[in-house]
């Protein structure tokens, strides 16, 4: 009788499949160059600080409209109130016009903004001087400090419109 069952020694054996060995791929990694793609957000368009200025100019324009009508309501003849009555309509028109021309991406928006900010600085300086001259106790140091602070603040705001890359790329029409 033959035994169909074979013992483990009698079964045909297969050679184990070769296991892949870890080979450092330093040479291959050095040959490949890693490329980084830097995506820079476009500076063209109304966004960033430019949208901030649109919001500030709209709020400033609305504020000066309110100052003008408040001056009409009070009917005061003080020098600071008369100064406000003269400057507030000009500043309201300038700020709202600046916001509109910037939103429309017009090149003139830069110049309207600069002119309006300069006019606001002039109004602030004149207001400081008139207030100091009407005061019973005048401090020359505070008056000069206020004038200088007003001029520096206005200049810093104007500087944005000359130094900003977004302004240069957006206000082109």
Image (spheres, rainbow, N blue to C red):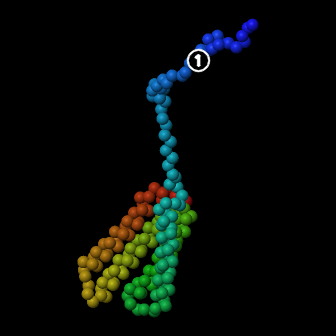
User: Residue, x 31% and y 76% (percent of image)?
Assistant: 146
Res 145 quadrant in image: bottom left
Quick one: quadrant of the C terminus?
bottom right
Camera-nearest residue between 2 and 64: 2
Q: Position of residue 54 (x, y in %)?
A: 51, 67
Q: Is residue 17 above or below residue 112?
A: above
Camera-nearest residue between 51 and 15: 15
Q: Is residue 76 left or right of residue 145?
A: right
User: Residue, x 48% and y 35% (percent of image)?
Assistant: 34
Pick out the residue farthest to the front: 1
Camera-nearest residue between 63 and 113: 63
Give the crowd class for mark 1: few <14, some 14-19, many >=20 residues within 10 Å: few
Q: Position of residue 121 (x, y in %)?
A: 38, 73
User: Residue, x 37% and y 65% (percent of image)?
Assistant: 156
Which SS class for mark 1? loop
Camera-nearest residue between 76 and 22: 22
Q: Is residue 21 left or right of residue 163?
A: right
Residue underneath mark 1 = 16
Q: Is residue 62 above or below residue 106?
A: below
Q: Is residue 145 above or below residue 4?
A: below
Q: Is residue 45 left or right of residue 77?
A: right
Kindly tell me whether residue 78 is visible in this rendering.
Answer: yes
User: Residue, x 26% and y 85% (percent of image)?
Assistant: 138
Q: Position of residue 53 (x, y in %)?
A: 48, 67
Res 125 quadrant in image: bottom left
């Amino acid at each position: 009788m033959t035994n169909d069952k074979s013992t483990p020694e009698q079964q045909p054996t297969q050679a184990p499949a070769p296991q892949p060995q870890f080979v450092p791929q330093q040479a291959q990694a050095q040959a490949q160059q890693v490329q980084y793609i830097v995506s820079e957000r476009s500076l063209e368009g109304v966004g960033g600080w430019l949208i901030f200025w649109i919001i500030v100019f709209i709020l400033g324009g609305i504020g000066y409209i309110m100052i003008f009508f408040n001056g009409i309501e009070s009917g005061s003849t003080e020098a600071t109130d008369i100064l406000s009555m003269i400057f507030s309509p000009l500043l309201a028109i300038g700020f709202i016009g600046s916001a509109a021309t910037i939103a429309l991406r017009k090149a003139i928006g830069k110049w309207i903004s600069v002119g309006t900010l300069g006019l606001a600085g002039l109004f602030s300086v004149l207001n400081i001087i008139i207030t100091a001259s009407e005061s019973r106790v005048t401090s020359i140091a505070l008056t000069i400090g206020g004038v200088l602070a007003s001029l520096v603040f206005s200049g810093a705001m104007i500087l944005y419109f000359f130094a900003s890359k977004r302004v240069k790329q957006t206000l082109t029409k």
